[in-house]
Image: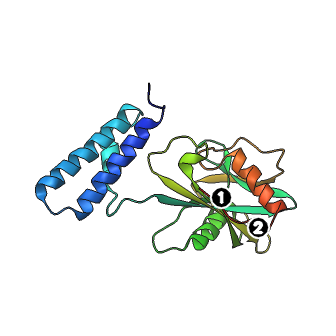
Amino acid sequence: MTAPATRWLDWARELQAIAQTGLAYGKDPFDAERYERIRALAAEIAAHHTDAPAAHIRDLFAQEAGHATPKVDARGVVFQDGQILLVKERADGRWTLPGGWVDVGEAPSEAVTREVYEEAGCRVRAVKLLAVYDRNRHGHPPHIWHIYKLFFLCELDGTPDPLPPNLETEAVAFFAPDALPELATGKVTAAQIARFFEHLRHPDWPTDFD
């Protein structure tokens, strides 16, 4: 029986997490050498299945310290007149919900309002947590990190400002559910957007999770 196409990524993630946590809590210098070797093996696995050099991935892994935990991505879901707000990414010309990493010392609701303004020029208030999704379980393309995605329903606070100059997005628009543009599926999927339109129609629904 062959392993699933992304099983290597699960192995690399787990080995990296073992190494990172071991380096954080281990006291024996010989154990530290073993954990460094485990980290190197994780990088070699990832490099073998991607175009990235092993040294680059080792450096990426080495930047992570302490107990290994998933990263947190917060996205804003903003509706206006039955349409959803999306931003166009400079990197690939595809569209996504505005959002990004939650910074250390920042509450998730603060992160999402900041990201929506930076990427879409919209002042918003986060009013409800619609979903907490494990990225691995929702049809996104593979990613080296294990990521939790938080989707917040946000209400517009006034009229949108002009799109602020930024390095990530080049356009902003509202779209009807049956007229979505090409999506950046690493950030959001059509199924997720469809689910959020259902939440709009059923405001009493509880938060989705997993």
State how the image is colored.
Answer: rainbow
Q: Is residue 148 left or right of residue 46?
A: right
Q: Relative to residue 102, is residue 157 depicted above or below?
A: below
The residue depicted at 13 percent of the width and 60 percent of the height is: 28
**Extreme residue in the right direction:** 81
Q: Secondary structure at mark 1?
A: loop
The residue depicted at 26 percent of the width and 63 percent of the height is: 24
Rendering coords of residue 54 (x, y %): 31, 39
Rendering coords of residue 64 (x, y %): 34, 58
Q: CA distance from mark 2 to mark 1?
A: 14 Å
Rendering coords of residue 4 (x, y %): 48, 32
**Extreme residue in the front direction:** 1
Q: Relative to residue 98, is residue 90 depicted above or below?
A: above
**Viewer-closest of 84 and 34:** 34
Q: Relative to residue 108, is residue 208 depicted above or below?
A: above
Q: Which mark is residue 98?
A: 1
Quarter location, residue 9: top left
**Viewer-closest of 154 and 209:** 209
Q: Nearer the viewer, mark 2 or mark 1?
A: 1
Confirm whether residue 163 shows in the render: no
Q: Amino acid at mark 2?
A: Pro
Q: Amino acid at mark 1?
A: Pro
Confirm whether residue 185 shows in the render: yes
Find disc 2 in the rendering and name its residue: 160
